[in-house]
Image (cartoon, helix red, strand yellow):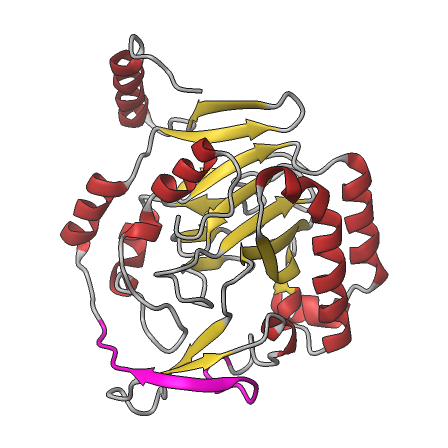
Amino acid sequence: MNNNIIRDARLEKAMDTDGFFVVKSFLNTEQLTALENLYNEYRPTDEINKYRFYASTFSTNLAYRQRLKEQIPHIFKPSLEKLFAGYKFIGANFILKIPGGNSRLEIHQDTSLLDESLFTPVNVWCPMTNVTVENGTLYLLPGSHRFFNSIRIPAIKYPYEDIFQHVLSHLIPIEVNRGDAVIFNSGIIHYSPDNQTNRERLVADTCITHQNAQVRIYHKDIDNPDSPLEIINQDDDFLEKFLYFRENIFARPEEGTTIGFIPYSHKTVNEAEFDALVHKLTNKYTFRQYNFAGDELKTVYFPALGGVAKLQQLAHKVMHMFQPQNA
């Protein structure tokens, strides 16, 4: 990671290579209660029912969004201080999936908000209930933050947009418990299915990066395919001020200072090219997991889904059985 903010070199390596790691017992009971009280303090029911998948950044109530930007980081901070140094917050929100379907979040990578050749955006995704495949947990493709050196904005199609179903077959569900955290590079390919249960799936989420990073957005005129990308520097609270995350995501923000323009050409990959990237850069067998409760870092196997996957995982275990393990 450039301009690293992760204290533990082993977790830094996991973030650089896999694009994520898991922290067990990231939040304690007191922190979880504080988040629940904050969520219940103002629950925008009309907006939630309108979308079924709801992030508080969709809200038109800027005072509400600003309060979450202040309070969620405040609640997270004691836990984050154990893992990170020299960081700052650039976003915080609640993410909700309503029960009963129609809450799927399609395959995507988060919008670029930094110069990622210099700084890394890190999401801290913390469920307020146990998350499973059934209630719409997070799916990730390990290592996919390294697949494409590209700027990600809504006005530009993903290189793999024409092969979404094929890409989906590679993603792996990350099932964790209430108060755990999945910490991932915002550029990793991820997705979450419908909530098929009869209970809400609520997540508290924040995005952090190096304290010296400049927040920026890239804007492209969607009516002019040949137009360059406009680079617009923003304040750190841009995500709390921009009003069009849901209704008009292509709108050019009124805020910010233009610092230049860069040419941009769209690239695409086919299934074979995508598979080659997976083969080269994805570890589908193991991930790194740190446990706050026991101050323990270990390598954990993904659940093997299907007979072929189980055989591949067994072969991987046998291959590594007699190799020295680095903690």
Q: Residue at x 36, y 85 (%)?
A: 260
Please determine whether, in this image, residue 46 is positioned above or below residue 84: below
Choose top left, top right, bottom left or bottom right for residue 142.
top left
Q: Is residue 9 above or below residue 2?
A: above
Q: Is residue 229 visible?
A: no
Residue at the left extreme? 272
Q: Which quarter shows the C terminus?
A: top left
- Looking at the picture, does residue 257 appear above or below residue 122? below
Percent of width and height locating residue 20:
45, 42
Which picture quadrant has residue 98?
bottom right
Name the foreground residue: 327 vs 289.
Answer: 327
Residue at the image position 45 percent from the left and 30 percent from the top: 288
Tell me what residue is drawn at x 20 percent, y 68 percent: 267
Task: Tell me where residue 287 sits by quadrant.
Answer: top left
**Residue extent of the magenta highlight:** 249-266
Tell me if 89 is positioned left or right of 298 in this view.
right
Residue 17 screen position, x and y as percent: 34, 40
